[in-house]
Amino acid sequence: MIWTDDPTRLLLVAGLGASYGLVCLMPWLRHRRKRRAALRAKAEAAASASPGWIVAYASQTGNAEALAQQTLATLRLAGIAAQLSELSELDADDLRRAERILFLVSTYGEGDAPDAAAAFASRLMTTELPLAQLHYAVLALGDSAYGQFCGFGRALDAWLAARGAQSLFPRIEVDRSADAAIALWRQQLSHLAGTSDAPDWSAPAFEDWRLSARVALNPGSAGAPVYHLELTPPGGVLPDWQSGDLVQIAAPAEPSRPREYSIASIPADGGVHLLVRLHSHEDGGHGVASGWLTRQAEPGQTVRLRLRQHRRFRLEDNAGRPLILIGNGSGIAGLRGHLRARALAGQGRNWLLFGERNAEHDFHYRDELTALHQAGRLDLDLAWSRDGGAARYVQDLLPVRADKLRAWVAEGAAIYVCGSLEGMAAGVDGALEQILGRARLDTLVTEKRYQRDVY
Ligand SMILES: Cc1cc2nc3c(=O)[nH]c(=O)nc-3n(C[C@H](O)[C@H](O)[C@H](O)COP(=O)(O)OP(=O)(O)OC[C@H]3O[C@@H](n4cnc5c(N)ncnc54)[C@H](O)[C@@H]3O)c2cc1C
Ligand SMILES: Cc1cc2nc3c(=O)[nH]c(=O)nc-3n(C[C@H](O)[C@H](O)[C@H](O)COP(=O)(O)O)c2cc1C
């Protein structure tokens, strides 16, 4: 009998053969498992090292931020992994690692970066970081009425190019939110993302609100007339907004160039309150929007208006902190909005430092503010530039109150500044720097505890 005829033997041999095969296969299987694990780890490492596309924005009043959000939505709709980041959140490592960044940045001051991006501009854009791996595009927002049109967007683009980064397409400049430039960005984006399926980018429409009341706040003042306006929404249905937000008003003579105003009320007030100063030109003519709102439009008449979120000036995470509110002139509008939100929430640690011309004529909302002060819910410091007191301007109040300011900031206070860019904002910033130091002030900006609505 040959051995293959014996089933027991056959099984034994087969079993031995299989075991032998298995023993021979084991190292290969182990090697394959290891290789797979290594490949998986490598893929995971690569994925975390390359975060896909970054949409980075620097925005003061929210235009660039809104466009950044729409840009992100378009990329995601096309199946592209992308993350949204404020420019200030990016550090040198992020830039060195990133392969594609879309920058949407506006310009403030005189050709400067928006507040939140000032540290990025001063710390990173002064370095010689090698960025040859980076592909980027810049959407620069600005207003050609300013000397340094799109100054920050241009500086950022020039710095990236000098660092060896490669632009995906030439910088697009948006003059006063011009639709054509935004459409071009959207078109380039669709092309890059390989999609024609972009979400709707249209800005919210203007609506017909009603001017329900107008009161002159400073009769007899040496300064330009200031008015308190109340507006009610179409159909009486109040939309939602938060203190710190803005409205845009389209005056009939210039509907395509709306003007911005800080909202001085909260929804619980039943309408949008504005404080509008009549703007006059050297030839004696009045400003288009302020002239129309304060002189031409009659109570009962329609005003074309839309609300704008102003995230950089909202309370948000600062709602639980003590508030230091600093402003001058029409800047009381944005600060009053916050005070009304605080009163509604029952929060009483508020300190207002305010400057105007004469106590007699220019103490806007005097009754309201003194009532809060007397109720112990508002610390009040006032500077009257024409009354001959020790402090002429609001910034002069700060050195006198330096110890209190340091103490409030140490206790976690947030600082909100509203009003004139010229004179006031720089003066206040300088005084805060003297008291707190630039590094501390920069940290407060990063922590969103130093917020400005200045114009
Ligand atoms: C964030 C922000 C908040 C503001 N809050 C207040 C407020 O609470 N109260 C207040 O009284 N004022 C506020 N202003 C100023 C206000 O927007 C107007 O600039 C002011 O009322 C003068 O406008 P005007 O049309 O009367 O004057 P105009 O002289 O007709 O215009 C003023 C200037 O704006 C220029 N301009 C032209 N088109 C535009 C445009 N589309 N957008 C902006 N400027 C343009 C003009 O060239 C001119 O130099 C704020 C401005 C900003 C940016
Ligand atoms: C106080 C102030 C200063 C500005 N300075 C400039 C400037 O120097 N150059 C410019 O091109 N645009 C300037 N602008 C226009 C803004 O860049 C423009 O309104 C932009 O759309 C704002 O976008 P944002 O809402 O994202 O900040 C300025 C606007 C304001 C209110």
Image (tube, helix red, strand yellow):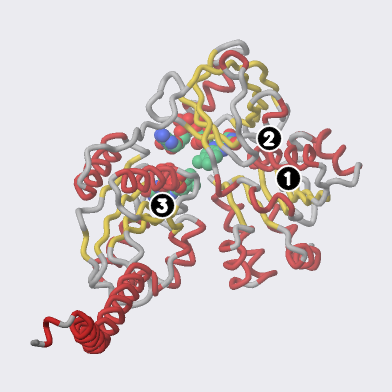
Query: Which residue has dot 2 on it?
Result: 222
**Residue at 35% in and 35% down:** 201
Residue 400 seen from this side: no
Indicate the position of residue 15 as horizontal and vertical percent values: 24, 83
Q: Secondary structure at mark 2?
A: loop
Residue labelled with disc 3: 107
In the picture provided, is 369 more to the left or to the right than 251?
A: right
Give the residue displayed 43% in from the left and 54% down from the top.
58
Residue 376 drawn at (x, y percent)? 90, 46
Q: Which tag, 3 or 2, sits closer to the chain's start?
A: 3
Mark 3 / mark 1, whichever is N-terminal: 3
Label 2 is placed on what type of residue? Ala
Q: Calculate the distance from the C-alpha at mark 3 to the C-alpha at mark 2.
A: 33 Å
Q: Residue at x 44, y 57 (%)?
A: 85
Type of amino acid under label 3: Thr
Q: CA distance from mark 1 to mark 2?
A: 9 Å
Badge 1 or badge 2: first in the primary sequence: 2
Contact check, label 1 and label 2, Cβ < 8 Å:
yes
In this rendering, does residue 3 appear at all? yes
In the picture, measured across the screen, residue 293 lies left or right of residue 415, that is left
Q: Which label belongs to residue 375?
A: none
Is ligand 2 closer than 8 angstroms to the Cβ of mark 3?
Answer: yes
